[in-house]
Image (tube, helix red, strand yellow):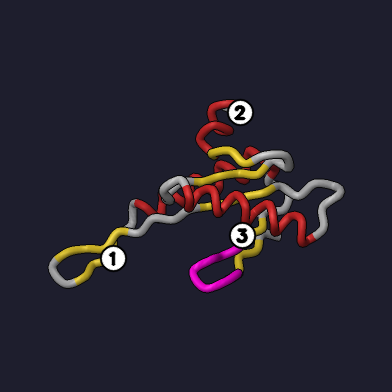
């Protein structure tokens, strides 16, 4: 079952069991793009949001702590490189979701 929960102030965790790397990257990018297209009406104008996403795929030797650490590392990279982007940790390294999407088609 997919689960979403507040992980920390201004940080949410989404678990997508069975999504695989490709499905996870696609979901993260769809979420990022959808949020960026939203405008909150304020006074005479509007406020736009953007989000940064960090994702990690669970591997056989993972513990909750190692999986969490990789997801946090991916999120830190997304924030560090300007925000409004998605990074994925593949178990070895972090890379932009856009690079992974190009590779997997």
Question: How dense is the environment of label 3, judged by Cα within 10 Å: few (below 14), some, or many (20 and up)?
Answer: some
Q: Residue at x 26, y 63 (%)?
A: 47
Mark 2 = which residue?
Answer: 104
In the shown orientation, is residue 73 left or right of residue 52? Answer: right
**Which of disc 2 and disc 1 is earlier in sequence?**
1
In the shown orientation, is residue 91 left or right of residue 60? Answer: left
Q: Is residue 22 above or below residue 77?
A: above
Q: Secondary structure at mark 3?
A: strand
Q: Is residue 9 magenta?
A: yes
C-alpha separation, residue under disc 1 versus residue under disc 3 = 23 Å
Q: Can you tell which mark lies on residue 2?
A: none
Mark 1 = which residue?
Answer: 40
Q: Residue at x 61, y 63 (%)?
A: 13
* Residue 94 rendering spot, x and y as whole percentages: 62, 41
Tell whether label 3 touches label 1 (CB within 8 Å): no
Q: How many labels were placed on the picture?
A: 3
**Which of disc 3 and disc 1 is earlier in sequence?**
3
Which image quadrant for residue 105?
A: top right
User: In which quadrant of the rendered image does the N terminus lie?
Assistant: bottom right
C-alpha separation, residue under disc 2 versus residue under disc 3 = 22 Å
Q: Can you tell which mark lies on residue 14?
A: 3
- Start and end of the magenta stretch? 6-14
* Residue 44 rendering spot, x and y as whole percentages: 13, 68
* Residue 56 rendering spot, x and y as whole percentages: 67, 49
């Amino acid at each position: 079952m997919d689960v979403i929960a507040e992980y920390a102030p201004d940080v949410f965790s989404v678990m997508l069991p069975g999504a695989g790397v490709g499905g996870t990257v696609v979901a993260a990018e769809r979420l990022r793009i959808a949020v960026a297209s939203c405008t909150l009406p304020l006074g005479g104008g509007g406020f736009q949001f953007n989000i940064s996403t960090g994702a990690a795929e669970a591997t056989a030797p993972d513990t909750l702590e190692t999986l969490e650490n990789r997801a946090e590392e991916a999120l830190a990279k997304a924030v560090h490189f300007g925000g409004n982007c998605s990074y994925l940790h593949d178990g070895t390294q972090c890379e932009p979701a856009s690079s992974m999407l190009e590779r997997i088609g």
